[in-house]
């Protein structure tokens, strides 16, 4: 799309963001339920479109142009479709995140400050494969009263178009739902245009590989929410239960190896008595173990796991804080004191005790769905659901109040929370 046309598209999205910001929650929920219903009724058409994408992508995998992990994420089966539809229904059942009073404070008699949740505005979403992203983000955007411009990967173009057609059809059936809340674009030029329009787009959320995320962060002035790497760790403490460790680590590595929350590095306390048995169980589960990786920063996205023996809990924490991408880490231990130290000292978006790192997911957190996982330390962190797509503003109500009275000492603040 040429630059001028994209600017017009972005302007329309900005205008739509102002309209949806004032929609009552009942109308938003009606829109979501319409979308879920229409997806269910059109799922065979969506599967047909996805089949075309898979057929076109397979030669690219065989030639090495497309990673197997990307191909795996591209497939949309009945289980993913079921979860996709249920995720939208779950979002409709969540509390409206907009217009919530986050703070109410009396500054002085008759002078009241309130902090109110509000939408961010226009979201630019750039993602690879995973066509279910469209429905997740569209649903979250509608419930959080944001407009969104979506740019999917070329490998899923047929599925993306069909899902968006079904969603737009559902929205068009609602008379009072504003136009241009959801927009889909397709070309590389559209990505370039999107990244340059900080006047109209308020937040960029990339969902894809390291190269995509780094490119976006380096080529835009718009705030970017997301993560480049998924270097997740599990530390097996001296007191760990062997069976518990096997269950958790095998799940974290093999349940979905290409996921960003799959474990990539295993740290084992040197005094853990069952290291040999643990490593054998991992190999029997089809995991390739690497004792001396080229880099502890490696994200394998496969059934490959780096491992290392450490002398102390503190050494494990230091290693994680040095090499982690800040995504998700877990400790396997029966020592509650060590668990607490680990969970307090490890600086990541998710820190778990005796739990698989694969739990780092908006759906599993009860968010209904997520737009992605953020390792940022501002605004939103971890799985980003509805609350992560809101910001806030401050309102003050008074009666002709002026600052001069407080500077002169005629009046004084009481700062009383209500």
Image (cartoon, grey):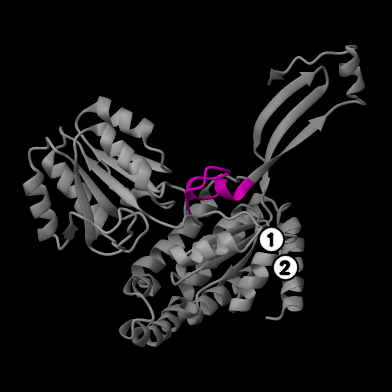
Quarter where residue 130 is shown: bottom left
Q: Which residues are magenta?
A: 373-390
Which one is in front, 318 or 155?
318
Residue 201 in the image, given as x and y percentages of width and height: 69, 60
Identify the residue at horizontal 64%, vertical 52% (top origin): 26
Residue 238 in the image, given as x and y percentages of width and height: 15, 34
Identify the residue at horizontal 82%, vertical 17% (top origin): 109
Residue 248 in the image, given as x and y percentages of width and height: 22, 47
| Crowd tier of the residue under label 2, counting other residues whose Cα lies within 10 Å: few below 14, some 14–19, many 20 or above | many
Identify the residue under disc 1.
201
Quarter where residue 339 is shown: top left
Residue 124 in the image, given as x and y percentages of width and height: 62, 63
Q: Name the quadrant of the C terminus.
A: top right
Above-or-below relation of 171 to 279: below
Q: Earlier in the sequence, mark 2 or mark 1?
A: 2
Element on which disc 2 rests = helix
Identify the residue at horizontal 37%, vertical 37% (top origin): 346
Q: Are marks 2 and 1 in contact (CB under 8 Å)?
A: yes
Q: Say if residue 291 shows up in the picture.
A: yes
Identify the residue under disc 2.
10
Q: Say if residue 138 shows up in the picture.
A: no
Above-or-below relation of 332 to 388: above
């Amino acid at each position: 799309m040429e630059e001028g046309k994209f600017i017009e598209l972005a302007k329309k999205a900005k205008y739509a963001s102002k309209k949806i910001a004032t929609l009552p929650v009942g109308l938003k929920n009606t829109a979501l339920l319409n979308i879920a219903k229409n997806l269910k009724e059109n799922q065979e058409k969506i599967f047909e479109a996805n089949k075309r994408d898979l057929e076109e992508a397979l030669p690219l995998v065989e030639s090495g142009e497309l990673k197997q992990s990307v191909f795996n994420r591209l497939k949309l089966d009945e289980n993913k479709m079921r979860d996709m539809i249920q995720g939208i229904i779950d979002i409709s059942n969540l509390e409206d995140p907009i217009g919530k009073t986050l703070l109410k404070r009396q500054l002085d008699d008759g002078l009241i400050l309130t902090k109110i949740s509000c939408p961010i505005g226009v979201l630019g979403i750039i993602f690879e494969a995973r066509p279910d992203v469209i429905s997740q983000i569209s649903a979250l955007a509608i419930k959080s009263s944001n407009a969104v411009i979506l740019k999917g990967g070329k490998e899923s173009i047929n599925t993306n178009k069909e899902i968006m057609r079904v969603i737009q059809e559902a929205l068009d059936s609602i008379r009072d739902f504003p136009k241009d809340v959801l927009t889909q674009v397709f070309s590389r030029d559209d990505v370039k245009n999107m990244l340059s329009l900080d006047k109209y787009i308020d937040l960029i959320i990339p969902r894809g590989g390291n190269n995509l995320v780094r490119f976006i962060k380096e080529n835009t002035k718009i705030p970017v929410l997301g993560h480049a790497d998924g270097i997740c760790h599990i530390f097996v403490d001296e007191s760990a239960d062997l069976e518990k460790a096997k269950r958790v680590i095998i799940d974290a590595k093999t349940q979905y190896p290409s996921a960003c929350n799959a474990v990539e590095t295993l740290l084992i306390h040197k005094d853990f008595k069952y290291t040999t048995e643990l490593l054998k169980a991992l190999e029997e589960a089809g995991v390739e173990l690497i004792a001396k990786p080229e880099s502890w920063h490696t994200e394998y996205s496969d059934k490959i796991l780096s491992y290392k023996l450490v002398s102390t809990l503190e050494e494990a924490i230091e290693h994680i804080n040095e090499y982690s991408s800040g995504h998700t880490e877990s400790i396997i231990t029966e020592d509650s004191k060590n668990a607490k130290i680990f969970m307090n000292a490890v600086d990541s978006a998710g820190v778990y005790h005796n739990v698989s790192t694969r739990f780092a997911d908006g759906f599993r957190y009860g968010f209904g769905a997520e737009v992605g996982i953020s390792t940022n330390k501002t605004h939103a962190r971890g799985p980003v659901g509805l609350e992560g797509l809101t910001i806030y503003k401050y309102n003050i109500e008074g009666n002709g109040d002026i600052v001069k009275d407080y500077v002169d000492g005629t009046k004084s603040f009481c700062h009383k929370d209500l």
